[in-house]
Amino acid sequence: MKNLVLGSACWNKKDNSYNFVKSLRKCYSGDVYFIVNNNLDQDTDDFFHKYRIKKIITNVKGKKIQKERFKIFLDFLSSNNYEKIFISDTRDVIFQNNPFLNIKFDKLNFFFEDNIIKNCEHNSRWIKKTYDIKIYDEIKLNQISCSGTTMAYRDEMIKYLQRMVFHIENYKYFSFFNNPHDQGWHNYIVHKEKKILEYKKFVNQDGFLATLAQSNTDDFIFSDVLKTKDGLIFDVVHQYDRKKFYDLMPKIIKNLVD
């Protein structure tokens, strides 16, 4: 049975997904679908066609795609049959190996950042604004799970997406100054719904997928590829474009996309 990579392109220029697409196609030849809207320019459309990126067309505009993507992914998977699925951000994700071949791949896989919720003002705000201070207090000491990358077998992915859609529709984010973020809903599900969803937790030093934004640079080895402190090569690197990694990642990126 086929595997599937699902992403979204809420922009109309190929530059923001160039590294994702180029590095992915060096290690994976299967199906890839991006959610796009009708603002896609011809150059980007040609680029997607060249690298066999198929399109899920939506009328949702701009960054609103990022919120609506979970419902769109769910609808797509409900009528398409795949074995393993990877839903991913596309602007700041790059591939070093095919993640579907990793022997650690479990039924449902969540990837955690090198920080706890309490120590991140953004994640703290998203949870407080989406739920309330009581929920925040219950989960604030838990490690942050990143909503931008999730891997699973089809049935478990559908269960996860159903929970995300339920929370998005029933728990609104109230703020005059900040936009909602799926991190709030995702981390509630991860930390409060363990009886509904059984998942495998991966931290950075497991060497499966690196989520870098909350990490220290000295926790990794930067060579031709990105490795853990113990020399494990990551299959996927997320959030590699953060400022503290600017001078450390260009050689790796070049190796992966050229």
Image (spheres, rainbow, N blue to C red):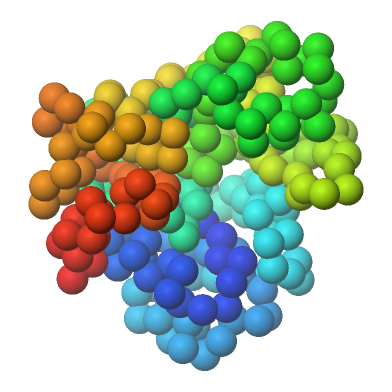
**83 sits left or right of 206 in the view:** right
Quarter of the image for residue 191 reads top right
Q: Residue at x 56, y 87 (%)?
A: 41
Residue 5 in the image: state x and y as whole percent: 44, 53
Tally of marks: 0
| Towards the viewer: 213 or 257 | 213
Q: Residue at x 81, y 12 (%)?
A: 134
**82 sits left or right of 184 in the view:** left
Residue 20 in the image: state x and y as whole percent: 37, 61
**119 sits left or right of 130 in the view:** left
Q: Is residue 15 above or below residue 78?
A: below
Viewer can see residue 162:
no
| Towards the viewer: 12 or 58 | 12
Q: Is residue 223 above or below residue 45?
A: above
Q: Is residue 193 above or below residue 214?
A: above
Residue 6 in the image: state x and y as whole percent: 50, 54
Viewer can see residue 8:
yes
Q: Is residue 118 above or below residue 54?
A: above
Residue 175 in the image: state x and y as whole percent: 86, 43
Q: Residue at x 87, y 34 (%)?
A: 170
Q: Residue at x 73, y 28 (%)?
A: 127
Furthest-bottom residue in this view: 42
**120 sits left or right of 62 in the view:** left
